[in-house]
Image (tube, rainbow, N blue to C red):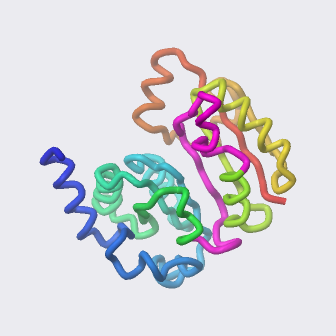
Amino acid sequence: MSRRKLHHYQYSAQAANVVEDGKELYTTVKGRWNQLYFNNENPIVVELACGKGEYTVGLGKLFPEKNFIGMDIKGDRIARGSLAASEMGLENVGFLRAGIQYADEFFAEHELDEIWLIHPDPQVRDRDENKRLTNPSFLSKYAKYLKKNGIFCLKTDSDFLYQYSLKTLSDLQEYRLIEHTEDLYSSELLAEHYGVKTHYESIFVAKGYSIKYIKATVV
């Protein structure tokens, strides 16, 4: 492990805005994020596979009346988001270091108001469908955590993942599609993203890739 990564892991272990294995909230926060972490009753928005937390921090800055949780397994990435949120004084932003497959251990039924999935690995090989974060199993889990009329949003540069996710969401009785576009940056829906973009999204756009977007609600 590089010194930089080691430093980030050490930072996360000490950061008050990171929930990870070894900290008390890691085993007690399920169903009680509002009470035990945020100390308010504001809506909770989760960004899955948040990476460096650019979206979590960006939205947290824009919407102080909402609570934001960035979830990722990579401690060095989490540390960067944690530091950014701390430097901005964002008390409505927190991070959870855990794999998405273990989300049942951290979120109760109907605890969340929104789930965002920003540029996940499309996992295009057929044999890797079980790893796609919009496969039927994962999407059904997200629906369980979301409140009725809760929102699920996906942004991706992958045509494959966009089409796959559209079909999967359409086939699942837990969801109703609200809107979608194959080219977010040429769509009026761009306003829903408030100018927040990740580093990699900026690279994709600069290279001419179109950004796809799907928004669905839990019925």
The residue shown at (41%, 54%) is 73
Toward the top, the furthest residue is: 208
Above-or-below relation of 185 to 92: above
Q: Position of residue 33 (x, y in %)?
A: 52, 76
The residue at the point 48 percent across, 38 percent down is 197
Would residue 154 be found to the left or right of residue 59 on screen?
right
Horizontal side of 203 relative to 177 (left or right) equals left
Reply above or below: 31 against 89.
Answer: below
Seen in the picture, residue 145 relative to 59 is either above or below; the reply is: below
Of the 4 image quadrants, the one containing the C terminus is bottom right
What is the span of residues highlighted in magenta in the rendered image? 107-136
Q: Which of 153 and 29 is in front in this view?
A: 29
Say if the magenta span includes residue 126: yes
* Image x and y of residue 164, in percent: 72, 33
Q: Is residue 28 magenta?
A: no
At 75% across and 35% down in the image, what residue appears?
180
Q: Position of residue 133 (x, y in %)?
A: 60, 45
Residue name at image x 66 percent, y 52 percent: 138
